[in-house]
Amino acid sequence: MKLCTRWRLALILSVSLAAFAETPAVHAENPTLLPLMPLPLHVVQGEGQLKIDGGFSIALEGYKDARLESARKRFLSTLSRETGIPYHDGTTSGEATLVVKTTGASDAVPSLGEDESYHLEVTPAHALLTAPNPLGAMHGLQTFLQLVSITPSGFSAPVVTIDDEPRFPWRGLMIDAGRHFQPLYVIERNLDGMEAVKMNVFHWHLSEDQGFRAESKIYPRLTGKGSDGLYYTQEQMRGIVAYARDRGIRVVPEFDMPCHTTAWFAGYPDLASGKGPYKIETHWGVFDPAMDPTRESTFEFLGKFIGEMTTIFPDAYFHVGGDECNGKEWDANPRIKSFMRAHGLKDNAALQSYFTARVQKLVAAHHRIMVGWDEVLQPDTPKDVVIHSWRGPQSLAAAARQGNRGILSNGYYIDLNQSAAEHYLADPLAGDGASLTPEEKKRVLGGEAAMWSEFTPPEIIDSRIWPRTAAIAERLWSPQDVRDLNSMYARLAVVSDKLEFYGLKHQSFTLPMLQRMSGEAHPKYLAVLAGVVQPPVGYQREELKDYDWHSPLNHLVDAVPPESDTARKFKNLVDEIVAGNASPEMFQKAKEWLTLWRDNDAKLEPSLKKSDIAAELAPLSQSLSQVAAIGLRALDDLQNHRVADAATTQNDTQVLKAAEKPQAVLRDMAVAPVETLVQAAAAQKP
């Protein structure tokens, strides 16, 4: 959410929540107005409210354990932060406001496919949450927290009955700690965010060319020489496993092999296929170093290492990467080429398949199931290997047809700065997946949001994960036909604000960065510019400028979220105007936005001179002013049914075309809607 609209949207939010609480009975098949994300399987809303005040209490009945008690305390702590009402314990000698009845235990080690269902019934007098185990109970508690809102009579939850369970059993978030190390507090608060939206797999990417982040006591040089001193101790990793388990989240570690392994070789060069010497990379990209698949010592090393890591990570699944091997070190090594000829390995893909088969046996020997990226899938890949698809639904479907289970990340690469809508509409069973047989569809386990960290130091990472990952969480939890974008964005705005109560910084990170850039306590004009620009999509940022490990990520491109809410709403407004559906008030709103952007450059210009970081924004600010002026002219033509002058239209179109190009590594998101206005004005009949 942008600084310039923060307080206005906070006011809208409280009004919206009150409206949500007064809607009639609804079902999930007809997207509900309740501010829930993920949207439950079945919802029936009644009349009235359950008051949430200082007398609110919660009681556990039936099966009880330490995890449920911890969940009860977290629930009260979050509720207290949101309402400002102190709930020191929440126990009561009388009847509790919310009763949680749990039938039995969950698995001691969280496992794939456990029952995650729950039933929640809220009446004007009390609430009852029932679940077969603690997992379902914890999900139901998060749903209740999302129901709480401010109303004219105080905080309350609407009367409602919910029956809910997930569509897919694997709903994950991958965080890459290899390229930019993420401190424990970042991992923990993102696990809290995952719990809030019912995600249940934390995929921890722990090794990269730029750093090996997991302590090994058997091979201490992995972090001794393979990191910059930033890594997780074994005690810390066990702590994260426990923290995640407490929230119903499994932890799947990833140690990439045979490539993306430069950091391994910094301490243990004998694992490599090349001559070295090796040191951790400080640039981004795909590099040549690869493990030597021809040496038995390589597999002896990996067997001991995998065994050590399984004592830390108890999950049944172990991710070995396997992606992006260019084979150059293999091609340059005569001994490896001779090995390939002797073993009938016709190419590097076959050599990698040989390596993967050996590693799979090592993983299985330690009672784990191997997970690997698309590249590990070969005709003879064992059926219990899980394929993690970054290439797309076609690869995922191919794995399912071959008999392997799979998970999808293509479409969920949140580092690429795509919109929440694009992620939301990506589905594990879309495309080729739609033609799978019912049995093959069961092999599609779900998906993961992927947070690669080239441009995400700890200060920024929350804003790249949230709130868009909540939309992905809904795609993986809710029924496939829940796809209404307007409903999704309305609920996402509410959930985004609520996630701040979990300690996430995706909204609050922008202001300190703008203050740093401008040297101003209240950088309101810089905030106006920030509110209508976005980072480049995909890999354009790397194409526009050379970055490495040492590049400061403190520019406006780093300080703005991947998706501008203001620009998205302006585009929607323009679409209504050109469709002929706009009221006078909508024309006025569009005019206000365009006037704000047109006039902002003159007000911002003195501030930009105060800082070299801000100075690069001068052309972008000037361009936004020009674009807005063009938009105002076209808007006036449309409102007054006046055909635009042909010469003016041609000149405006050229200016807008130039403004499409990124400036200061940022995209002006007002350009496309203004182009729409100009085209519509020119297309009017006299």
Image (cartoon, rainbow, N blue to C red):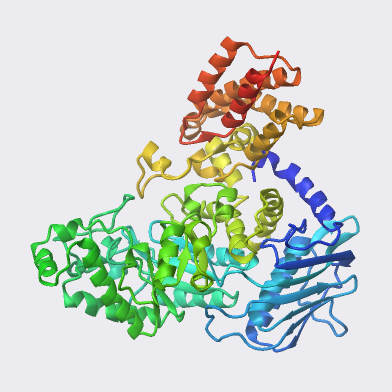
Answer whether residue 219 is visible to the viewer in this image: no
Position of 210 relative to 533 (above/below): below
Position of 538 relative to 204 (above/below): above
Residue 77 falls left or right of residue 521: right
Residue 330 falls left or right of residue 210: left
Viewer-closest of 553 and 197: 197
- Where is residue 11? Give x, y as percent: 79, 46
- Residue located 54% across and 20% down the image: 653
Q: Quadrant of residue 385?
A: bottom left
Answer whether residue 377 is visible to the viewer in this image: yes
- Residue located 26% across and 54% down the image: 287
Quadrant containing the C terminus is top right
- Where is residue 269? Give x, y as percent: 19, 66
Viewer-closest of 659 and 238: 659
- Where is residue 23? Give x, y as percent: 85, 57
Q: Quadrant of residue 495?
A: bottom right
- Where is residue 263? Give x, y as percent: 28, 62
Position of 641 relative to 324 (above/below): above
- Residue located 84% across and 54% down the image: 18
Residue 225 falls left or right of residue 385: left
Q: How many numbered badges does the structure rendering display? A: 0
Residue 265 falls left or right of residue 166: left
